[in-house]
Amino acid sequence: MEIKIMKNVLDRNQDKANDNRKLLSDKGITMINLISAPGSGKTSLLEKTLDHFGSMRKIGIIEGDVATDHDARRLAIFRTPVLQINTEGGCHLDSHSIDKALQNLDLGSLDLIFVENVGNLVCPAAFDLGENHKVAIVSVPEGDDKPVKYPLLFRQASAIILNKTDLIPYTDFRMDRFRSYIRDLNGSVPLFEISCSTGSGLEYWFEWVKQV
């Protein structure tokens, strides 16, 4: 019975995700779903991205958190539309919450939406929001084994970001092993090795965003 209930939840979520995707397609908007564990640097990456693109892209943000609007306030200084969703304990955003968010954004003024999902490598991977791309973000302090521990996300990802590479000399993180895990799971996926602190590698991420 629990399996049937979960299937029904996922089916309803998928139906609304398909509606969201059609709406965004009709409006000419690309949506990117950023998924990571807490502390990997999603908000820092968005700060760097908004600062880089400025008025070159018409960007909106949907900010998902269990509680607080701390990250949304960090992003609001870029004069970008930011809509906060607090899940009040929920471990992921779903397509119905995104639908409500889209209803409260001026879609006619946007061509790109970033969703900063709730910090979690498991649940968000199972729930389609209607996005065009899932981007998996991990950081060096989390270890090099995250792809094999959470394979669904890394198989689905359109791009993968490894953040905080400036910390590699101070950890036992093995880049060769991390890259091997990624290639085994998703051989053609772009992998961006970056540091939001130093700015290293961000230009490749910016170029990818420019092309989507």
Image (cartoon, rainbow, N blue to C red):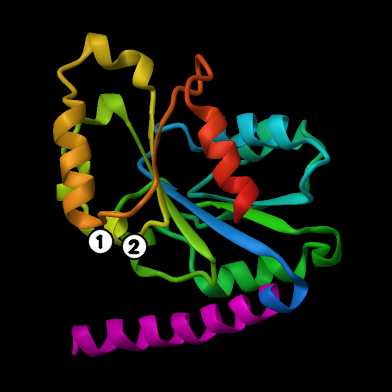
First to last magenta residue range:
1-24
Q: Residue at x 21, y 52 (%)?
A: 150
Q: Secondary structure at mark 2?
A: helix
**C-beta proximity under 8 Å, tags 1 and 2:** yes
Q: Residues within 10 Å of mark 1 (few under 14, many from 20)?
A: some
For the question of whether residue 162 can be seen, the reply is yes
For the question of whether residue 68 can be seen, the reply is no
Q: Is residue 69 above or below residue 114?
A: above
Residue type at mark 1?
Leu
Where residue 146 sits in the image (x, y, percent)?
21, 42
Where residue 23 sits in the image (x, y, percent)?
69, 79
Q: Residue at x 27, y 24 (%)?
A: 141
Q: Residue at x 43, y 27 (%)?
A: 194
**Which quarter of the picture shows residue 160?**
top left
Instruction: Find disc 2 in the rendering and name its residue.
Output: 156
Q: Secondary structure at mark 1?
A: helix
**Which quarter of the picture shows residue 26?**
bottom right
Residue type at mark 2?
Gln
Instruction: Find disc 1 in the rendering and name its residue.
Output: 152
